[in-house]
Amino acid sequence: MPTSPTDSPTRNLLEVSGLSAGYLGEDVVHDIELSVGAGEAVAVIGSNGAGKSTMLKAICGLMGPSTGSIQFDGSEIAGTKAHMVVRAGMVYVPAERHLFPQMAVQENLFLGAYPSRPDNDRLELVYSTFPRLKERSRQHAGTLSGGEQQMLAVGRALMSSPSLLVLDEPTTGLSPILAQEAYAALAELRKGGLTVLVAEQQVPLALALADRSFVLDHGRITLSGTSAELAADPAVRQAYLGI
């Protein structure tokens, strides 16, 4: 059975230990142990309802954990408010995207840089990664296609120059072709050195992107290892790859 490597290839940018979190006093995720090395891509895979979103929200400060430690870039951030987590360099892209539909694409991007002033170099990076956003820079975000809205959500997150980009189900509502395009863009960002943590139901895409992966089942990490190890594991192949 695959297990997490004992030694990370680089320093750990994110270390989660003993994390439990939930709603109304009832935990949904339990005793999460997870790490992300600087420059690494890590995937958390699991079916709908496994607890992926709850786990990411707790890590990113959108809900307080019941127990556990969250170390980000050497500092404890468990219980820290979400806006302070963003300022520390961890930026979360929710599955729902939460764009401002009546504002133009570029205005949405500029809000991603807040409280700093928008940086032209950063804007050009977003536009070079997602050329369609540049073509639609003056268009209202609410009139974009689902795939374009996902590009905008990721682009807005990039405007803050994150150390760690956290994505919750980035393929939600996307066709298979657009889902592949989204992951191709993430792969290009990785080549530029961006560290990524992604939770995903589209397991083949996530495993192809990630260096290491974790399986979350009923709120608990049940398997972990390199993505190649998990892709070859019979349990993963049967449960998530349809093989």
Image (cartoon, helix red, strand yellow):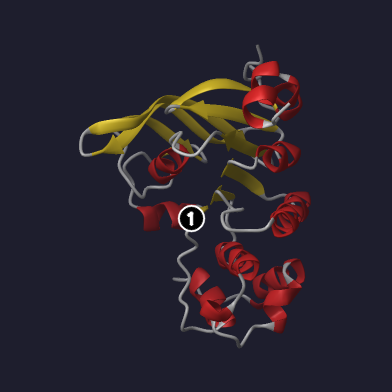
Q: Residue at x 73, y 49 (%)?
A: 190
Outermost residue, front direction?
242
Q: Residue at x 72, y 34 (%)?
A: 211
Q: Quadrant of residue 173?
A: bottom right
x then y, percent, for residue 48: 49, 39
Outermost residue, left direction?
24
In this orientation, which residue lies closer to the viewer: 21 or 5? 21
Query: To which residue does mark 1 refer?
Result: 94
Residue 205 shows up from this direction: yes
In this orientation, which residue lies closer to the viewer: 44 or 144? 144
Label 1: which secondary element: loop
x then y, percent, for residue 152: 60, 69
Q: Is residue 161 above or below residue 165?
A: below
Q: Residue at x 30, y 31 (%)?
A: 27
From the viewer's perspective, tell me whether residue 39 is left or right of residue 96.
right
Q: Which quarter of the figure is the N terminus placed in?
A: top right
Look at label 1 and name its amino acid: Pro
In this orientation, which residue lies closer to the viewer: 124 or 166? 166
Residue 113 shows up from this direction: no
Q: Is residue 193 above or below residue 76?
A: below
Q: Quadrant of residue 4?
A: top right
| Disc 1: CA contacts within 10 A as few (<14), some (14-19) or many (>=20) | some
From the viewer's perspective, tell me whether residue 178 is left or right of residue 140.
right
x then y, percent, for residue 138: 61, 88
Q: Residue at x 21, y 39 (%)?
A: 24
Outermost residue, bottom direction?
138
x then y, percent, for residue 20: 35, 29
Q: Which quarter of the figure is the C terminus placed in?
A: top right
